[in-house]
Image (cartoon, helix red, strand yellow):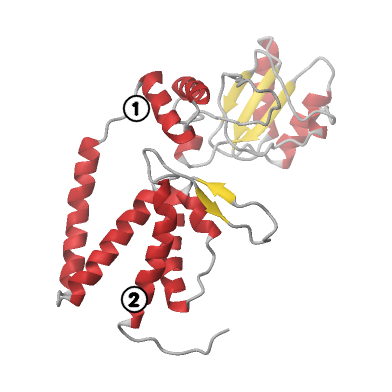
Amino acid sequence: MGIPKVVFQPETHQGMQGGINQLAEAIRPTLGPLSRIVAINSLGGDKAPELLDSGGIIARRIIELPHRTADMGAMYLRHILWQVQEEVGDGVATTAVLFQTIYNEGVHYIAAGGNAMILRHHLESGLGLILEEINRMTVPLTGPNQLVRMAESVCYDPPLAKTLGEIFDLIGEYGRLEIRTDYSPEINREYVEGSYWDSNSLLTQTEYGLPSKVKRELPNASILVSDFDLEAPSEMLVFLDKMHKAGLFNLILITKSLSAGVLALLHQANQEANRFKIIAVKTPGTAFIDQTAL
């Protein structure tokens, strides 16, 4: 560890600038539309270099620079890039190149006698105009053909891009997509119609009467959605009685929570042979993607 010291100008901005430029130049080759590969040496030293085309992953692989002042600039940009990766999922290389250019030109402006606060004011004012223009120029993807072209720009694999275009055209923006490992050279897919959200079951597996099963299937099930807590067993008993009279025996119950009395009632109903089969799950969360499940 080096001796602590106070760093002054021009070493401050020169070190920051050097770190920003080093990180940005490592990510720049991945900028599309025809990105290139960046090789990252393994920390172990005995493994082959890691070949990456994702700016976000490259930024995460760079954890420290030798020079402390340069490291501060690199880590500052690295944090910004990872925020973009987490919130947007793309655009890291574009962010790195834009940040590098704005910083370098800003340093030239200030070194020539420019006012840093005036520069900041114009950057903030111009941001709104640029965002408005980008929104005006944005063309939404419509139809499988455009989705295929977009997918191919990411994976560079025409057969895979064709499959992805078909998938996203069918499931839409908020559809559930699961990617599973397969040893076949072919690209396979399976579509399941329905809704999906992450939820915990309100009944345990043993309360379902099927301790060995994780997957539950209820053909021709009735669905009860409640936006309040179910606390009174008598209310649930009335509902089950009406279901029985109507010849309905399979129920999916979606609710915030169940009282101990209601849980005991549903457990008893599930245990009775040739009677009810009930699944109870929590309502989706408040996130928009969860609400679309309803």
Number of residues whose C-alpha sits closer than 10 Å to that of mark 1, classed few (under 14), some (14–19) or many (20 or more):
few
Q: Which mark is residue 141?
A: 1
**Residue 11 placed where, x, y %?**
35, 82
Q: Nearer the viewer, residue 153 or 135?
A: 153
Say left or right for 228 vs 105. right
Label 2 and label 1: CA atoms lie apart by 43 Å
Q: Where does the image place residue 19, in percent across and percent down from the top left?
A: 41, 69
Residue for badge 2? 14
Residue 73 found in image quarter: bottom left
Q: Is residue 60 above or below residue 221?
A: below
**For the residue carrying disc 2, how many other residues have a C-alpha within 10 Å: few (<14), some (14-19), or many (20+)?**
some
Q: Nearer the viewer, mark 2 or mark 1?
A: 2
Report the residue at 69% width, 37% height from top. 202
Residue 103's image quarter?
bottom left
Residue 273, position as x, y percentages in the image: 85, 18
Query: Residue type at mark 2?
Result: Gln
Name the amino acid type tagged 1. Answer: Leu
* Residue 280 visible in the displayed image: yes
Residue at the image point whose x is 39% and y is 38% from the top? 34
